[in-house]
Amino acid sequence: MNGKIIIIGSRGFIGSHLMFEIRKKWPGRVIGLDSGRLDLLKPASTGILSRCLDKRTTLITLATARRGLDGDRLIRHEILMAEHLAVALRKKKIRKWVHFSTTSVYGDAGSNPSITEETPIFPNTSYGIGKFAGECLVRAAVEQNGTKWLCVRPTMVYGPGDHGGSYGPGRLINSTRNSGRVILFGDGTERRDFIYVGDLARIVVALLLQDRNGVYNVGSGRGHSMRDVVNLLAGLTCSRIKIQCKARLRRKVDLKYNIGKLQSALPGFRFTPLRAGIEQSVQHSCPLS
């Protein structure tokens, strides 16, 4: 792959891991942009970004709305960032746009036993709505000038550097470390697909090497529950974790993602087992005792 690689959101949880993997493969050709250098909420960001782009650029976007936002405000921020990004990409045709979206765009999809890239989009959270709206805005812009695009929709990402902003393994690890107790919704047995952040970064690099385009759901293809995570933490810490259960905000749904398309592109890819991923996350965030 020729040309430079620009990563917007390079200092975030996923972005920092992706920077590490890409620099191993293409040293000296990666430019990281964080919100301090490029604030996509500001109109001036379109000119700043446009000046960085050329026809050999691969642009990777991981920018997302700031933490703490919810509801309409979160959706507005996602759309505003996408609008500014779209303006810049209409002005300049680049080699490829790589976008990090989310499987939240499918909503709960409770009646679907195996969610694929062809599953109808029906987000039921502000986060999912905002991400899909932004995805559509920028995709329309790049398709207008013939730029190739790759959209990655990860399942629930966890690993070293995850500060636990949302309900998932990162929050459970941090809560266990800080207080020895965790909060679970319902009985915590609903199943989710957790993807280790290092695996996600390696997968994106592999897809870039193959010059893949289109939409790819990225997950492990396996289901685990929050209870599974708590049990692993208890074993790693050799301690009893206090569990507080709260009423579910939505009905209980087990989500299963079909990663057949990803496996066809990357046959034989070895995913990090949940236990190993949790252990590495714990060690990174300070050994628990």
Image (cartoon, rainbow, N blue to C red):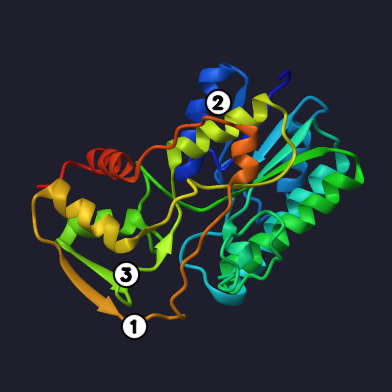
Q: Nearer the viewer, mark 3 or mark 2?
A: 3
Left/right placement of residue 287 relative to residue 149 reads left
Left/right placement of residue 32 relative to residue 67 reads right
Q: Provide residue 43's location: percent of width, then percent of height.
A: 73, 54
Marks 2 and 1, how far apart in space?
42 Å
Is the residue 154 above or below the residue 3 in the image?
Answer: below
Q: How busy is the neighbourhood of tag 3: few (under 14 within 10 Å), some, or many (20 plus)?
A: some
Instruction: Name the amino acid type tagged 1.
Output: Ala
Q: Provide residue 174's location: percent of width, then percent of height.
A: 26, 55
Give residue 22's mark: 2
Considering the numbered disc 3 on the image, is that residue within a helix, a strand or a loop? loop
Instruction: Name the amino acid type tagged 2.
Output: Ile
Q: How busy is the neighbourhood of tag 1: few (under 14 within 10 Å), some, or many (20 plus)?
A: few
| Quarter of the N terminus within the rendering | top right
Q: Which residue is mark 1?
A: 247
Q: Which residue is mark 3?
A: 188
